[in-house]
Amino acid sequence: MEYRHQRFRLSFGRTQVMGIVNVTPDSFSDGGKFHDPAAAATHAMALVEQGADIIDIGGESSRPGAEPTTVEEELARVIPVIRALVKAIPDTPISIDTYKPLVAQAAMAEGAAMINDISGLRDPAMAALAAKSGAPAVVMHMKGTPKSMQNRPAYSDVVAEVKSFFKERIRTLTRMGVEKIILDPGIGFGKTANHNLQLLNRLEEIVAFGYPVLVGLSRKSFIGKALGENITDRETGGVVANAIAIAKGARIIRVHDAVLGTQTALMADCIRLGKKQVDRRGPTGP
Ligand code: HH2
């Protein structure tokens, strides 16, 4: 399966690595590091150099308890970075991590080629924008909002609830003309560590919808919780979790560390496909 948009081709024969660039002062693992547009652009170029296929730019933290950012502030953070990157890395699709249609629209006017919406395109204006532009759109499941989502999240069956959310979203969005849907269970968004583990354990059930599945688990707290109280380094746990997600059918992994991410994708793809030399330089670009 592949999604073509403008000059880009996202081919899901191999796992796509999405490198995270948070242009925020308060993101949970790298807040403040790339707040300056020049630092963010340099970091994005390094991620591409290390093998990232897609760059995901976000201007508002969605960590638990985070306060929303205004449209003006979010635009001021992300637009200069997108402008710089469209020139510097024209072969790499830029994804805009926002649930605000005005931010997505401005980002796409500057050359962003993909929408990553943690609210699952619940705002009809966002769905309309995805339909009109034809851009691939990540539809993520989140229970509540970042401000409140970790206040005792409860489900009778988390996987069943996420699946019924996707069922409704797919029906509504395809009716509105959104074709290039990517599903994301939303690891850590209104979920306990056990909920996250159940979603990963039963990821095949989400893959069964027939759309590409993205997982964003990099450095999240369920890894630290699974490995023990004092763990500060969550990278090894993230590599294992991403590899298992790929084995279960995930085709995009969203990562902070592109060296580890591309090695994970390559190794997991080699085993999954039963052959070496999976072409990591295969097309996502022109
Ligand atoms: N996770 C985060 C942000 N955006 N988008 C998708 N599709 N899936 C995710 O799991 C996801 C996401 C949170 O991680 P991060 O960007 O590192 O932190 P913050 O939200 O604090 O900026």
Image (cartoon, rainbow, N blue to C red):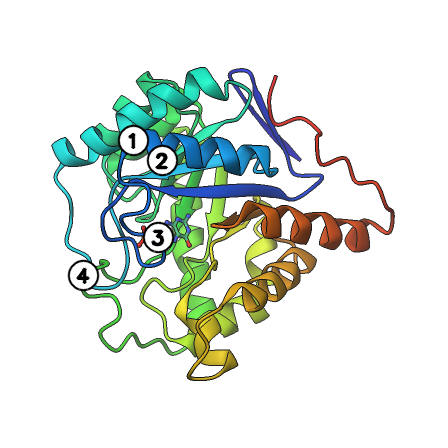
The residue indicated by pointer 4 is 147
Amino acid under label 1? Answer: Pro
Q: CA distance from mark 1 to mark 2?
A: 5 Å
For the residues carrying marks 2 and 4, which lies nearer the camera in this image?
2
Of labels 2 and 4, earlier in sequence is 2
Q: Which residue corresponds to the image point at 39% horizontal and 50% vertical from the top-left?
A: 140
Task: State whether residue 174 appears in this view.
Answer: no
Q: Which residue corresponds to the image point at 27% horizontal and 35% vertical from the top-left?
A: 36
Of labels 4 and 3, earlier in sequence is 3
Query: Residue lying furthest bottom in this view?
Result: 229
For the residues carrying marks 1 and 4, which lies nearer the camera in this image?
1
Q: Quadrant of residue 175?
A: top left
Task: State whether residue 238 appears in this view.
Answer: yes
Quadrant where the N terminus is found in the figure? top right
Cβ of mark 3 under 8 A from ligand 1: yes
Q: CA distance from mark 2 to mark 4?
A: 25 Å
Q: CA distance from mark 4 to mark 3?
A: 19 Å
Q: Residues within 10 Å of mark 1 (few under 14, many from 20)?
A: many
Q: Which residue corresponds to the image point at 26% horizontal and 22% vertical from the top-left?
A: 106
The residue indicated by pointer 2 is 40
Disc sitting over residue 37 in the figure: 1
Q: Nearer the viewer, residue 217 or 145?
A: 217
Q: Quadrant of residue 111?
A: top left
